[in-house]
Amino acid sequence: MKTHLECIPCFIKQSLEAARMATDDEEIHEKVLKEVMKHLETISFSDSPPELSRDVHKIIKTITKSKDPYKKVKDQSNQKARNLYPRLKKLVDEADDPLLMAVKLAIVGNVIDFGTSNRFNLEDMIDNAVKKKFVDEAYPQFKKTLEQAKTILYLADNSGEIFFDKLLIEKLTKRGKDITYVVKANPIINDVLVEDAKFAGIDKLATIMEGDAGQKISAPGMVLSYASKEFQEKLRSSDMVISKGQGNYESLSDIDREVFFLLMVKCPLVAQDIGTEMAQLVLKVK
Amino acid sequence: MKTHLECIPCFIKQSLEAARMATDDEEIHEKVLKEVMKHLETISFSDSPPELSRDVHKIIKTITKSKDPYKKVKDQSNQKARNLYPRLKKLVDEADDPLLMAVKLAIVGNVIDFGTSNRFNLEDMIDNAVKKKFVDEAYPQFKKTLEQAKTILYLADNSGEIFFDKLLIEKLTKRGKDITYVVKANPIINDVLVEDAKFAGIDKLATIMEGDAGQKISAPGMVLSYASKEFQEKLRSSDMVISKGQGNYESLSDIDREVFFLLMVKCPLVAQDIGTEMAQLVLKVK
């Protein structure tokens, strides 16, 4: 997905938020905004939002001297989601279609996102997942591909959300699938790192892979030009690909293979690209 | 009121909207955003938002070669409000306290604003004005000052909103007040010009004055350093000053005289400055 002009004010708003997470120094906040604007004057809109976001966050980190401005909110999200996990697991176990409930909740977990301007209430969304009929044409194909798949590549998105991923991954491993869970190599917004995946115990269910291993800066989405050879090989050879979140959708929506995108729509431009509305739980196949 | 860092993404969002109103050429939209960012890198945050907005809109107008990008939406607002006027007048005439209802509706009219990111539904707000108790400590002082005043300086804000102003101005003229209705000298966002005031027939009720007469560029708020000597004299000598909207609040909230600010709170920073919440109808005295 290409970048739109509307992304510009959104990048700047996010830069201010990240700068404030990193430091209380208002002079530094101002410097961050001005340097980010200076950079955004030079960008090409044919790059995807995660590619541009990568450079924006590099500027933020350099000026604030913070390697991980979102560390605190990531830890809070992980703790909060860990506390929710037993309740969520019960919802899955007691559902008429446990796999469907696990898919829906994995999408609901994507509400935990500091990479977008629009925020939603997690509790409301959980209720929503339980009550709302998940009318999506892609679910039968999801089940069919899953049935035939031995290997699954699962692209993670955000901290906290990992406990929602865990519900689905548990369902997949019970079916004997071999899962590779893809995280980022370096802190970027609130995206999942190896340490987060381990905190949620996903390393006991799946092989953890840094999709952009070797890169010194990560993007908030698996941008192919920054991806490792190992990831690219897995992307080709895996029987099934599950991609979480907007960032991965923006990076991979144009690739030439079947991908199941699970995401909460938090941006009007992504909504437009998908052909849906804001705040929808989406399971889209490509 | 000084400018906050949050105003930056808001200025940029507004620039994109204005550029799109002026032309369909996407290259020009991009050029506008980049030039606006270049300018915003140089600003001082001690200036008020309307002062900075003035320069931002100058850039937009220069690049798009449009003297008045909001002309169409201003005309639409005027038409829409003219159609509403008979219904509004009935609401005032039938109210227990017609003056209070005219004040409330004059504030509701301020919902018609293209100068802020947050938009509200006008019909909902009219219902709101009728049903909602207008608990405001400033109303007794408003009535007291009004009772003793012979001359009133009334600072207009937006097109469309003028028909809501007219309801209040009619109440004031019935009490024999001498009213000066202050508009901008040049197009700026959807602010009222002489032609709009005439369209609403306010020239038959009040003396119309361009507050920044002689300036070649107007700001979306009556910034004192750009105001004419005549306006400054009126501001000192008038018995009562009624100021509509956020822009005038941002420009004049720190001046040293009694001013009644009538506005809809459409920005979280103005809400914070006033000590209220978003979407509130505010009558504040200074």
Image: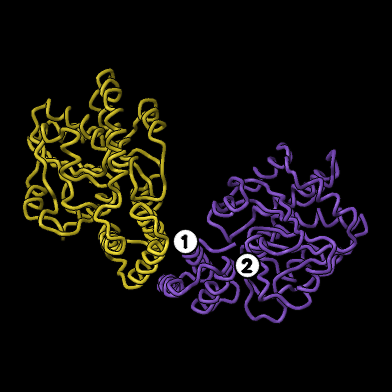
Chain colours: A yellow, B purple
Picture quarter containing residue A175? top left
Residue A193: x and y in percent read 19, 45
The residue wearing badge 2 is: B220
Which amino acid type corresponds to the residue marked 2 in the rendered image? Pro
The reply, left or right, for residue A248 in relation to residue A4 is: left
From mark 2 to mark 1, how far is it between C-alphas? 19 Å
Q: Give above or below for A243 relative to B171.
A: above
Host chain of mark 1: B
* Of the image marks 2 and 1, the number of the one nearer the N terminus: 1
What residue do we see at 85% from left, 54% from top? B145
Residue toward you, A177 or B142 = B142
Q: Secondary structure at mark 1?
A: loop
The percent position of residue B207, horizontal first and vertical second, equals 84, 69
Residue B21 appears at what percent x and percent y? 53, 67
| Residue B5 numbered tag | 1
Quadrant holding the N terminus of chain A: bottom left
Q: Amino acid at mark 1?
A: Leu
Left or right, B55 with reference to A4? right
